[in-house]
Image (cartoon, rainbow, N blue to C red):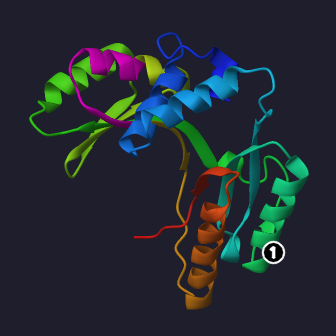
Amino acid sequence: MAVKAGGADPESNSKLRDLIQKAKSLNVPNDNIDRIIKKAASSDCENYETVYYEGYGPSGIAVIVECATDNRNRTSADLRHYFDKYGGNLGTTGCVSYQFTDQGVILVDAEGVDEEALMEAALEAGADDIGLEEDTFEVLTPVSDLYAIKEVLEGKGYKILSSEEEKIPSSNVALTDEEAVTKMQKLLDALDDNDDVQNVWHNWETE
């Protein structure tokens, strides 16, 4: 999908370059990466599209699921089954997305990093905020500037652990009923096991 959207050259396609880095961090062989890029650039490659599904888990937990699919009917049927099976229901577009804010999130290795210098560099590049979580700095950015800010920080020598578009819930909901907790976890596990599912966001307070 990244190749079709921005071309097969990672030098000019920042999204593709970021995905290649992520694949390498997961020990995907270079031959596999090259083969996938060549296949995606060919005219006979399957057409995948990004589709977002929204719904409620047990006890009204808001859930957004990002899928990459070549068959919407199959994907929506699978997701509807998961939500129904584990005490929730798949809703309509917009039913829960208003409870989330789109945000770019860059994680920077904190080892040996001066926080003030990183903050200055990040804010000058257009970041919204920066915070420290254990041994990692979290840089918040506008989604539209995520990859540009990541490249600026990389150019200054910072070690980028990940850069993702996230959906941040405006508030979280705690589950106290053990059955609801079990069902919610099983719902997330089922979504995670589905090949079409790329990302899942929710407002379940798990800590």
Amino acid on which disc 1 is placed: Asp
Q: Is residue 174 left or right of residue 127?
A: right
User: Crowding near pointer 1: few (<14 within 10 Å), some, many (20+)?
Assistant: some
Q: Quadrant of the C terminus?
A: bottom left
Residue occupying the far right of the picture:
73
The residue at 27%/14% (across/down) is 155
The residue at 16%/22% (across/down) is 117
Tell me if residue 194 is in the magenta stretch. no
Image location (x, y in percent) of residue 9: 54, 13
Residue that numbered label 1 is attached to: 84
The residue at 53%/57% (across/down) is 171
Kindly indicate the quadrant of the structure image that contains residue 110. top left
Identify whether 166 is placed above or below 1.
Answer: below
Image location (x, y in percent) of residue 126: 40, 17
Which residue is more in the foreground, 33 or 104? 33
Kindly indicate the quadrant of the structure image that contains residue 163. top left
At mark 1, the secondary structure is helix
The residue at 45%/39% (across/down) is 23
Residue occupying the far top of the picture:
12
Image location (x, y in percent) of residue 118: 21, 25
Q: Is residue 90 visible?
A: no
Q: Quadrant of the N terminus?
A: top right
In magenta, the rendered stretch is 149-162
Image location (x, y in percent) of residue 88: 75, 73
